[in-house]
Amino acid sequence: MTDKVQLAKEGIEAFSAGDWERFKAPLRADAVYEELATQRKVQGPDQIVEASKGWKEAFPDATGTITKVTEGADTVVLEITWQGTHTGDLVSPMGTIPASQKRVKISAVQVVRFKGDKVAETRHFFDLMTLLDQIGAVPMPATA
């Protein structure tokens, strides 16, 4: 395993542990984090930590299990299974979703790009609709 693979894995492990100093350590000062499902994009280690803390506040027991790793020259791709219980408010651009006390399990992919030995960009792809359905936040369609 290369250092880049270990650094990419470190982000998932540190998030799962809620260890924000460890989570922030491999990030470049100009690092970018993007969630395609929520259309959220933040820049800088402090902003990335704050965005991640929001997820951890909504799902305090959230953990990521890495199921597959693929490595390129300056990129590491992680396939992840996220699990956790929605025991805190989930703040979103569409408003706050109150805690449902429901357990979630979703698949995700993170594409982690490096510049030198630091993380320059993380693009996080996950199934937001499944997450919302699992916590009961998907509106039911009107019946005819």
Image: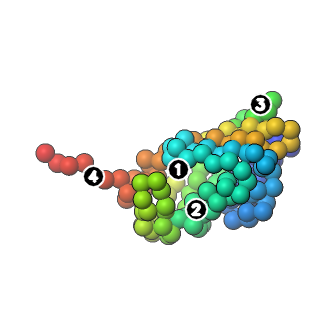
Residue 73 position within the rendered picture, expressed as x and y whole percent measured from the top left: 81, 29
Mark 2 crowd level (few <14, some 14–19, many ≥20, 10 Å Cα) = some
- 23 left or right of 79 in image: right
Q: CB of mark 2 within 8 Å of CB of mark 4?
A: no
Disc sitting over residue 72 in the figure: 3
Disc 1 versus disc 3: nearer the observer: 3
Give the residue at mark 1: 106
Mark 3 crowd level (few <14, some 14–19, many ≥20, 10 Å Cα) = few
Residue type of the residue flagged with mark 4: Met
Label 1 vs 3, first from the N-terminus: 3
Label 1 vs 2, first from the N-terminus: 2
Residue 79 position within the rendered picture, expressed as x and y whole percent measured from the top left: 64, 42
Disc 1 versus disc 2: nearer the observer: 2
Label 4 vs 3, first from the N-terminus: 3
Q: How far apart are marks 4 and 3 (CA)?
A: 42 Å
The N terminus lies in which quarter of the figure?
A: top right
Q: CB of mark 4 within 8 Å of CB of mark 3?
A: no
Residue type of the residue flagged with mark 1: Ile
Q: Please name the residue shown 58% across and 62% down the image.
A: 54
SS at circle 2: helix
Disc sitting over residue 54 in the figure: 2
Q: Can residue 36 be seen in this view?
A: yes
Q: Distance between the residues labelled 2 and 4?
A: 26 Å
Q: Is residue 108 visible?
A: no
Q: CB of mark 4 within 8 Å of CB of mark 1?
A: no
Residue nearest the viewer, comparing 119 with 103? 119
Q: CB of mark 1 within 8 Å of CB of mark 3?
A: no
Residue extending farthest to the left is 144
Residue type of the residue flagged with mark 2: Gly
Give the residue at mark 4: 140
- 76 left or right of 104 in image: right
